[in-house]
Amino acid sequence: LALHKVPALRWVGHARHHSITPLDATQVVNHSLVDGLMQVVTNIVTLNLLQSHPLVRALHNVFITFLLTESHSGFDFPWALHNVVPFGLLGGPPAHERHHQCGTVHLQQFFTYMDRAFHLVDVRRAREGENDRLR
């Protein structure tokens, strides 16, 4: 949230991630050193606080890499996680594409509950025709 709301952090750390459109899976690694460091440190601190088993850490890394790649893929397949997981808990590529278009909605990385709680969800869905770039 801070990477989008605090101008200094946005331009120092996160603007590079939003610089290339349309989305594709290669943008997962298109971020600044500050942005990447913040992501990795947050994950390490969280896993350490939870005293996670090494196998859990390995599975976490695989799953996070999958979610990041999927959310940047631009694909809206019927079998994609955001279409399979109930209650719209995951935003998936449509929400992340919309986030990259305007930058003020869908700020949560994968899930949608915080975006809904703070009214940061764009009610228009990219897959309903407003976004031609979504494949």
Image (cartoon, helix red, strand yellow):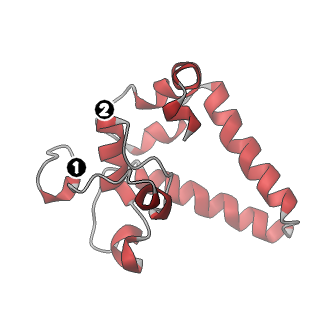
- Count of number-bearing discs: 2
Q: Tell me the distance, in whole angstroms, between the alpha carbons under discs 1 and 2.
A: 11 Å
Q: Is residue 81 left or right of residue 47?
A: left
Taking 13 as reference, is 94 above or below it?
below
* Numbered mark located on residue 21 in the image: 2
Residue at image point 28% right, 66% down: 77
* Numbered mark located on residue 38 in the image: none
Q: Is residue 134 left or right of residue 81?
A: left
- For the N terminus, the quadrant is top right
Residue at image point 34% right, 40% down: 23
Per the image, the residue denoted by label 1 is 134
x, y percentage for residue 42? 73, 46
- Name the amino acid type tagged 2: Thr
Q: Within 10 angstroms of label 2, few (less than 14), some, or many (20 or more) residues? A: few
- Name the amino acid type tagged 1: Leu
Q: What element carries label 1?
A: loop
Q: Is mark 2 on a helix, strand or loop?
A: loop
Whether residue 76 is visible here, answered yes or no, is yes
x, y percentage for residue 65? 58, 54
In the rendered image, the residue lying farthest to the left is 129
x, y percentage for residue 72? 40, 47
Whether residue 30 is visible here, answered yes or no, is no
Tag 1 near tag 2, CB within 8 Å: no
